[in-house]
Image (tube, helix red, strand yellow):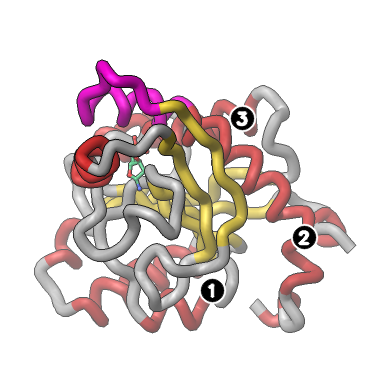
């Protein structure tokens, strides 16, 4: 049975660290009906100055800045995030430019319920230092003809969880890391809403203990 068996939208907890354009694209997709049976329950940022956090506040979406937690240990930070997600009754966690590696507390609290978007065609150009423009620089240096973005499940292996969807873009000979990033980002905005929409429809059947949350 699909998520609406609960007679309410799937509550998304969106983790960001900066700009928040994927967050904004998801909210737009909810508003225009491309992403159904979902609502943003809370936006959490590990940086108080994140543009996406102010944007969410202006939209009256609950938004929590946990900058203070950043100076704490990884476990304390992850516990603070997990508690915030739980307090907002989050069903599905969406990483949208969150720049920290998630630890055990969140992974254990949301098994198979954390999604991430990465700006390459994983498994290519993923892993520890493959963030931001580094990814696009590496793609250009390797002379790739194609790049794109990937939505995947988050596990303890960085960028290593099951792939849920990919969109492709052509690499142009005139591309710089910045122009390639911009073209990939356009695809990210389309892909994330589609994958989240599809994922929600399968969420109940994916989880044996869904009701126990
Ligand atoms: C995106 O490129 C995403 O793939 C990566 O971080 C960036 C976040 O951008 N994980 P934004 O904050 O959603 O604009």
Name the N-terminal-most of marks 2 and 1.
Answer: 1
Q: Which residue is mark 2?
A: 202
Q: Nearer the viewer, mark 2 or mark 1?
A: 2
Q: Which residue is mark 1?
A: 110
Task: Reply yes or no: does residue 175 show up in magenta.
Answer: yes
Residue drawn at 20 percent across, 40 percent down: 141
Q: Quadrant of residue 89?
A: bottom right
Image quadrant for the C terminus?
A: bottom right
Q: Position of residue 70 (x, y in %)?
A: 16, 65
State left or right for residue 73 relative to residue 84: left
Residue drawn at 49 percent across, 48 percent down: 150
Q: Secondary structure at mark 1?
A: loop
State left or right for residue 100 relative to residue 83: left
Q: Quadrant of residue 139?
A: top left
Whole-angstrom CA distance, mark 1 to mark 3, is: 23 Å
Q: Which residues are magenta?
A: 171-186
Report the predominant secondary structure element of the magenta stretch.
helix
Residue drawn at 64 percent across, 33 percent down: 30
Whether disc 2's CB lies below 8 Å from ligand 1 is answered no
Q: Position of residue 53 (x, y in %)?
A: 31, 39
Say few, some or many: other residues with alpha carbon within 10 Å of mark 3 (under 14 / 14 to 19 / 20 or more): many
Give the total number of marks visible in the rendering: 3
Image quadrant for the N terminus?
A: bottom right
Q: Position of residue 45 (x, y in %)?
A: 30, 51
Q: Which residue is mark 3?
A: 29
Of all residues shown, which one is farthest toward the top?
Answer: 174
């Amino acid at each position: 049975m699909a998520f609406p068996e609960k007679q309410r939208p799937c509550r998304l907890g969106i983790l960001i660290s900066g700009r928040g354009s994927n967050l904004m694209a998801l909210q737009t997709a909810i508003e225009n009906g491309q992403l159904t049976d979902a609502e943003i329950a809370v936006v959490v940022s590990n940086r108080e100055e994140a543009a996406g956090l102010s944007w969410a506040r202006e939209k009256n979406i609950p938004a929590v800045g946990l900058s203070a937690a950043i100076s704490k240990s990884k476990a304390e930070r992850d516990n603070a995030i997990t508690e915030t997600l739980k307090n907002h009754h989050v069903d599905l966690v969406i990483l949208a430019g969150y720049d920290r590696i998630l630890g055990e507390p969140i992974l254990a609290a949301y098994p198979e319920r954390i999604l991430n978007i990465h700006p390459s065609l994983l498994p290519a150009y993923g892993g520890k230092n493959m963030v931001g423009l580094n990814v696009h620089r590496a793609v250009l240096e390797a002379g790739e003809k194609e790049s794109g973005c990937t939505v995947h499940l988050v596990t303890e292996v960085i960028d290593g969880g099951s792939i849920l969807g990919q969109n492709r873009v052509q690499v142009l000979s005139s591309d710089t890391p910045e122009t390639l990033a911009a073209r990939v980002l356009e695809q990210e905005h389309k892909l994330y809403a589609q994958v989240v929409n599809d994922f929600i429809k399968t969420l109940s059947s994916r989880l044996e203990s869904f009701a126990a949350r």
